[in-house]
Image: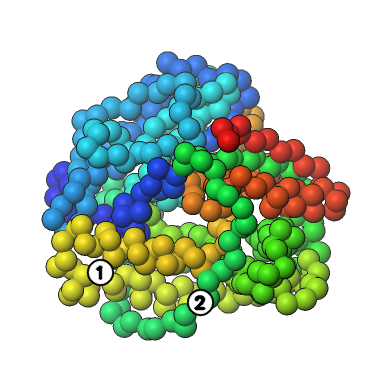
Amino acid sequence: MASANWYKIDNVAKVFLATVGQRDTRSFRLSCILKEDIDPELLQQAVLSAIEDRPQMQVRIRRGVFWHYLEDTDLMPVVREEDDRICPLLYDPPKTMLHYQVTYFGKRINLDISHVLADGTGAMEFLNIVVLDYLKRKYPGELTDVTVHSGASEGDLSQDSYRQFFGSKNLERKPASKKAYHPSGLKLPYNQLQFFEIHMPTSQIRPRAKELKVSLTSYLGALWMLAIRDEMPPRKSQMPVTISLPVNLRNYYPSKTARNFFNSVSVTHVFGGDITLEELAKEFDATLREQLTEENVKKQMDSFETMEYVAFVRVVPLLIKQLVVRHFTKKSSKKVTFTFSNMGVQKHPEQLCEKIGDYTGFCSTNSMFSTMFGYGDKLTLGVSSAYTNTDIVKNFVRRLSESGIDITVSATEVIK
């Protein structure tokens, strides 16, 4: 925190702000599905209570000479029934707006939030604070001893953990990665996205990963690679398929920040010939484990964070900075085929689980992005796609279904 009412923006948020678009709005949605319909008045009360625990949400993005910054705002959130697109545009100057919103539909509570404010971990905790407060109001006296709050101080929650833990100023040039394969076909018109929810029992899918001695992330990551391979035209069959995986850095460093604190690692494979799911999953898992050693994570982040300290970058006006950031972000995105984010398993006390049915979520994208949520015996993937072609999702679902997994899929309608 730089003063009583304004805050510096972390380096990841600077990238998001420079690359906000009508399709890739740089926002994401987290949803909690309860077991009965939502009472909007109680939800409004719960949100107003939750922002007292998380005042970091009550900010506006402002433009400075050299960087954007966050400033406290008196704007209050207004809960409403869902009537907008998933992952809406939540930063649209010069409009005066909060950079998150809470909506509901049927049994579902949605939190749409700009990635400038938080990453998935910070946003999920905020959503759970809202949900618990709502349920306490709905069922007075039943959940008095339940908490989902981390107990972190306001200073810890507002901490820029990138600056705290990284930035040794020892730049190390990494080997250049190649342009990755991108799905074939046209993109959806009017900056649209289409969204798919894929549901399956955890008890059916986890044993398959254990049989191969790989993580569930690696198992499903390999399945996504094969689903992409099945769609690749012959002339592009030698292009790398690269899956980017966001990593929660709180698993490596003692941070309780509610802001962004993640990094991304990549797993790449070139399909030069036949390969089995077992072989690919083991290769995926070995590469991922190597990437996720503390030494490799820190080495990559030191290089990233140091960019802010380069004298030339610091003194260039914001407009020019944004043009530079957009250029390098676009260049970097060409090296990624697909993004796969494991949001982890939501674990609650039994009395709270009795009232919560499931979790799901989506992230905006210019290509394809899948989230993964675990809750009880439910595993849910939320897939966002900018493409008219749905073959990759169909291939993925088909492979799971043919292996005996009970799959349920739902999709949004789009105007074509």
Reading the image, the residue beneath label 1 is 308
Instruction: Tell me if residue 143 can be seen.
Output: no
Q: Nearer the viewer, residue 266 or 285?
A: 266
Residue plotted at (73% across, 48% down): 394
Residue plotted at (71% across, 38% down): 409
Reading the image, the residue beneath label 2 is 177
- CA neighbours of label 1 inside 10 A, class few (<14), some (14 to 19), many (20+): some
Of callouts 1 and 2, which one flags the residue occurring earlier in the amino acid sequence? 2
Please tell me whether residue 266 is drawn above or below residue 66 in the rendered image.
below
The residue type indicated by label 2 comes to Ser
Q: Secondary structure at mark 1?
A: helix
Q: Nearer the viewer, residue 414 or 85?
A: 414
Q: Nearer the viewer, residue 125 or 169?
A: 169
Residue plotted at (54% across, 43% down): 188
Closer to viewer: mark 1 or mark 2 = 2
Q: Position of residue 298 (x, y in %)?
A: 42, 74
Image-based side of 129 in relation to 139, left or right: left
Q: Secondary structure at mark 2?
A: loop
Residue plotted at (39% across, 32% down): 101
